[in-house]
Image (spheres, rainbow, N blue to C red):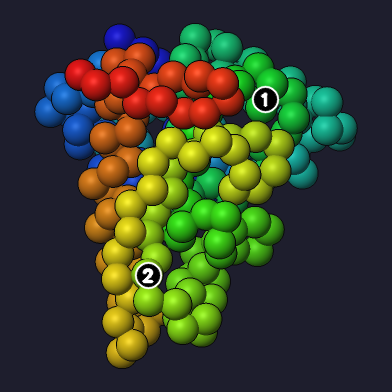
């Protein structure tokens, strides 16, 4: 059983989707804690309803960047964290965490990277930019985390059509459906050790 730490800033619907698959016994892992940069995000209520510990950890609470990083690393170590799952986490991950959890930290992005990603591309900003661009396909990207926003090795991408009449809200709804389907699936594969890095490329092994 692998130990998963979820990092999230918002309402936590992706956390919930993962947790539901864990509850059904479909994932060989358990969420050991939920960490947020916010004081009391919606995701904390979802975690607390399952008695999962929550931690609000923000750079502003600490005198130095080193203290902040130490707090994050100690918290993760206390739970013997195997994997970090970024599920709508809006802060850049400090380099020491990226190094400690190299290829053990994944993120979900609500577009087809490398398009519509990077600093400032989060939440509805992404879907507004997609609609404004006139592009007819968007989707979801699940990828490993490195020290840049939305930049690490891609694990999985799934597409969905954008119709000419789609508003950003409609696109967000379509993409969210994909997120809830495929993020738990990637977490499942991760916990089954089916995702490998070979020659700096992601390989998903057959089951
Ligand atoms: C999702 O669209 C995710 O892709 C993005 O932030 C959103 C989080 O939604 N990174 P939720 O908090 O999981 O509902």
Q: Which residue reaches farthest bottom?
A: 165
Comparing 203 with 180, the one in front is 203
Crowd class of label 2 (few under 14; some 14 to 19; many from 20; radius 10 Å)? some
From the image, tell me which residue sits under label 1: 97
Quarter holding the N terminus is top left
Judged from the image, the secondary structure of the residue bearing numbered disc 2 is strand
Report the disc number at residue 137: 2
Nearer to us of marks 1 and 2 is 2
Marks 1 and 2 close (CB-CB < 8 Å): no
Relative vertical location of residue 138 with respect to residue 18 in this rendering, above or below = below
Q: Position of residue 93 (x, y in %)?
A: 67, 37
Q: Is residue 146 left or right of residue 95?
A: left
* Image point (38%, 48%), residue name: 157
Residue at point 67%, 25% (across, down): 97
Disc 1 residue crowd, few under 14, some 14–19, many 20+, Cα 10 Å: some
Horizontal and vertical percent position of residue 84: 49, 27
- Seen as rendered, the residue at the extreme left is 24
- Which residue appears farthest toward the front when viewing the image? 199
SS for callout 1: helix
- Residue at 74% from the left image edge and 30% from the top image edge: 95
């Amino acid at each position: 059983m692998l130990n998963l730490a979820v990092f999230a800033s918002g309402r936590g619907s992706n956390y919930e989707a993962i947790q539901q698959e864990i509850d059904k016994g479909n994932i060989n892992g358990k969420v050991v804690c939920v960490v947020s940069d916010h004081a009391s995000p919606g995701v904390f209520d979802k975690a607390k309803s399952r008695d999962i510990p929550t931690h609000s950890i923000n750079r502003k609470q600490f005198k130095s960047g080193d203290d902040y990083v130490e707090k994050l690393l100690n918290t993760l170590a206390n739970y013997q964290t195997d994997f970090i799952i970024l599920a709508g986490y809006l802060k850049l991950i400090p380099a020491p965490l990226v190094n400690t959890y190299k290829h053990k930290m994944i993120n979900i992005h609500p577009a087809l990277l490398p398009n519509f990603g990077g600093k400032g591309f989060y939440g509805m900003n992404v879907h507004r930019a997609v609609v404004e661009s006139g592009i007819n396909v968007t989707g979801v990207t699940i990828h490993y985390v490195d020290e840049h926003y939305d930049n690490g090795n891609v694990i999985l991408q799934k597409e969905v059509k954008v119709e000419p009449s789609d508003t950003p809200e409609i696109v967000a709804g379509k993409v969210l459906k994909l997120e809830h389907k495929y993020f738990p699936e990637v977490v499942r594969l991760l916990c089954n050790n089916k995702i490998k890095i070979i020659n700096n490329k992601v390989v998903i092994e057959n089951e």
